[in-house]
Amino acid sequence: MDAFALKKIFLLGWPVLSVLLFCSVLSLALILERLAYFRKRKVDVKDFLKKVRGSEKSLTSLGEPLASVARAAAECQGKSRGNLDLAVDRAVRMQVSEMERSVPLLGTIASAAPFIGLLGTVLGIIRAFRSIEVSGGGGPQVVAGGIAEALVATALGLFVAIPALVAYNHFSTRIRRMTEDLEICADEIVTFFSKD
């Protein structure tokens, strides 16, 4: 397929294809942003347990998101166990909320892109049948533009959806595991700061 034919297909299907291209760019930006975010944040329970059993000074060397939870506990030191639990729970929920940011949008793109592609497919097929009606007959030249538009829309919808779905599942699993580890560490932090 030459560049002119591809350009013609994109011009015919521009409303649907432009939405899919926008979804593709948005999805890529979200994936890269979340990869960078998670690269900087880790919850290593074993390492944390060694540090927390040491001294309060060792808690200051924790990386995010544990450092935020430890800071919240340190600010409530000397208060009741209930206040400490509440502060740590709030800090954990804030960290989980930050981890989840933009991930549902990836799931929405992964779910919607095939349907947007299907819409483009249906519109391309309608255009192909319209061409048959206008020309009064059939033949490959009459329907080729509409069919090509339909296939490009389907392919682009899948091209957008597959990476978004893989990334959504990866980030969702990572968030779930980090949340579980963060809750284990939060319990230890509460225990550490309520020793007095």
Image (cartoon, helix red, strand yellow):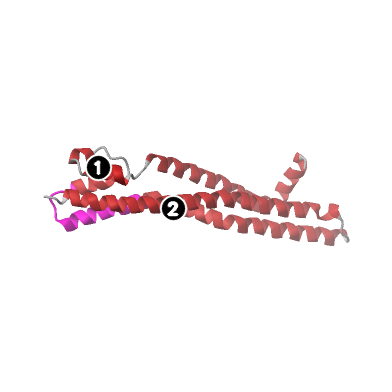
- From this view, report whether residue 59 is shown above or below residue 121: above
State the residue position of label 1.
50
- Circle 2 sits in a helix, a strand or a loop, which is it? helix
Q: CA distance from mark 2 to mark 1?
A: 26 Å
The residue type indicated by label 1 comes to Lys
Residue 115 x %, y %: 61, 59
Residue at label 2?
Answer: 173
Q: How far across and down, in percent of the image, does residue 174 sit?
A: 42, 50
The N terminus appears in which quarter of the rendering?
Answer: top right
Residue at left 19%, top 47%?
75
Q: Which residues are magenta?
A: 75-96
Mark 2 touching mark 1, by CB under 8 A?
no
Asked whether the viewer can see residue 76, the reply is no
Amino acid on which the number 2 mark rests in the picture: Thr
Q: Residue furthest right?
A: 137
Seen from the viewer's position, the closer of residues 150 and 11 is: 150
Q: Quadrant of residue 112?
A: bottom right
Residue at 75 percent of width and 39 percent of height: 3
Residue 22 x/y as whole percent: 58, 47
Whether 26 is among the magenta residues is: no
Which numbered disc flags the more N-terminal residue, 2 or 1? 1
Task: Point out residue 124 in the picture as x, y percentages from the top left corner.
Answer: 73, 56
Say if 81 sits above or below 3 in the image. below
Q: Is residue 61 above or below residue 193?
A: above
Q: Residue at x 77, y 41 (%)?
A: 4
- Please tell me whether the stretch drawn in magenta is mainly helix, strand or loop: helix
Apparent side of residue 23 relative to residue 148 in the rendered image (left or right): left
